[in-house]
Image (cartoon, helix red, strand yellow):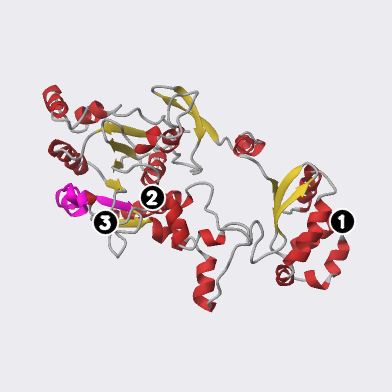
């Protein structure tokens, strides 16, 4: 069977972003087949090249995970020569992605208006902490602060303890995903109109959107949702329970599930007759009593027994795993979620592959994250058709290294 090109084959993205939110956006576009030309400061590169250095590989695992399928060009955009190279690359690109603070690109004469003048079809995606206008546009945006300010942190953690942020920088990642979705929508619209446009995707706006039902509950009724730990405000039983051989989590939302749960998992049909547990709404109201009963029951047997019973009864449940246990699990192996990519310095590197699956236009086979400036001359020669003399002039001017 002939394999079709990847969905974004032929799309070129000029990636001026760094750290997490912007690179995550271009990571998803690169997995879909777009050519990603990543511009990095030529002496130190993306800031995360210095974070989470692997003892085994001698490279940043943080950088490896976010920058596969990209070409690295070491270029100083603060120099006049570097700015001209950016403009030349923008003329030949479909998309620009950057995540500087408001005004930074404009001060370097590389803002949307400048680039749109030379390439009216450009899709220019700007990611920032608080957007390109408004009272906080000049503030730096960091995931933990945004989680706190947006109200998201107030929903996470145990009710009698301080709020906690998510274990990973979830708002950065979700902002990158929203930005990628916006880029795809703009590319689709451009097919109809022939015009480019400017996209503004702030971390703060993303985090407020992620309040989801907590936001609509307040806006409708003025009710402020709080923290319930591993439980749930809308359904019971939901939570984490200890057994004689480890913890597991379960979740159910319907009365039919609770009936099977009591009869087949707990073997406690009398719970169905308890007036406190007759409906999901009543179980939510009597959460503490129900949790206490379940804690006592689950402590009598091993985790494997309870998980087998849940699986047999069709009750959603699973073990609490650390990262190693999750990545080495039969579920990950069964989905072929771990792949390998060839890295220029480290050889074959294992990584998690894209979760997107297409029947006809598959994602691309991953290529390892680039070395700093690995593709500088390749891009300058191949894409901009510069000769040896022009490249040497750029080097002498300090625009490239």
- The kind of secondary structure element at disc 1 is loop
Instruction: Specify the segment rendered in magenta.
Output: 105-127
Q: Quadrant of residue 381?
A: top left
Counting from the top left corner in percent of width and height, residue 122 is at: 24, 50
Which of the pair 229/276 is nearer the observer? Answer: 229
Residue at 44 percent across and 41 percent down: it is 361
Which of the pair 40/33 is nearer the observer? Answer: 40
**Is the Cβ of the residue at disc 1 closer than 8 Å to that at disc 2?**
no
Q: Is residue 265 at all visible to an observer of this figure?
A: no
Taking the image as shown, residue 147 lies to the left or right of residue 373, namely right
The numbered dot on residue 198 is 3
Which of the pair 252/83 is nearer the observer? Answer: 83
Counting from the top left corner in percent of width and height, residue 373 is at: 29, 29
Q: Is residue 193 magenta?
A: no
Classify mark 1: residues with Cα within 10 Å, few (<14), some (14-19) or many (20+): few
- The kind of secondary structure element at disc 3 is strand
The numbered dot on residue 180 is 2
Query: Which residue carries the number 1 mark?
Result: 267
Alpha-carbon span between mark 1 and mark 2: 48 Å
The numbered dot on residue 340 is none
């Amino acid at each position: 069977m002939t394999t079709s090109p990847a969905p974004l084959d032929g799309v070129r993205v000029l990636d001026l972003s760094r750290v997490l939110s912007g690179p995550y956006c271009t990571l998803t576009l690169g997995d879909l087949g777009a050519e990603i030309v990543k511009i990095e400061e030529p002496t130190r590169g993306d800031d995360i090249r210095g974070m989470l250095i692997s003892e085994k590989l001698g490279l940043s695992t943080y950088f490896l995970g976010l920058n596969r399928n990209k070409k690295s060009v070491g270029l100083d955009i603060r120099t006049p020569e570097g700015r001209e190279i950016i403009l030349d690359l923008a003329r030949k690109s479909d998309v620009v992605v950057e995540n500087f603070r408001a005004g930074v690109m404009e001060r370097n004469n590389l803002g949307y208006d400048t680039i749109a003048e030379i390439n009216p079809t450009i899709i220019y995606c700007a990611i920032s902490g608080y957007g390109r206008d408004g009272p906080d546009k000049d503030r730096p945006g960091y995931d933990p602060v945004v989680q706190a300010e947006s109200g998201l942190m107030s929903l996470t953690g145990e009710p009698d303890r301080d709020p906690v942020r998510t274990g990973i920088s979830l708002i950065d990642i979700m902002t990158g995903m929203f930005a990628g979705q916006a880029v795809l929508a703009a590319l689709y619209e451009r097919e109809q109109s022939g015009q480019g446009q400017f996209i503004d995707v702030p971390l703060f706006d993303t985090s407020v959107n992620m309040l989801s039902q907590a936001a609509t509950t307040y806006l409708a009724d003025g009710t402020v949702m709080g923290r319930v730990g591993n439980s749930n405000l809308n359904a019971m039983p939901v939570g984490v329970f200890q057994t004689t051989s480890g913890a597991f989590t379960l979740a159910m939302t319907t009365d039919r599930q609770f009936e099977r749960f009591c009869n087949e998992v707990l073997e406690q049909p009398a719970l169905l007759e308890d007036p406190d547990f007759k409906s999901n709404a009543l179980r939510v109201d009597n959460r503490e009593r129900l949790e206490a009963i379940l804690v006592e029951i689950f402590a009598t047997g091993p985790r494997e027994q309870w998980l087998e019973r849940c699986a047999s009864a069709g009750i959603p449940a699973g073990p609490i795993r650390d990262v190693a246990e999750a990545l080495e699990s039969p579920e990950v192996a069964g989905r072929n979620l771990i792949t390998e990519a060839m890295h220029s310095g480290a050889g074959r590197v294992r990584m998690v592959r894209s979760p997107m699956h297409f029947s006809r236009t598959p994602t691309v086979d991953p290529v390892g994250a680039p070395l700093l400036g690995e593709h500088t001359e390749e891009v300058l020669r191949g894409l901009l058709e510069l000769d040896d003399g022009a490249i040497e002039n750029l080097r002498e001017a300090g625009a490239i290294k």
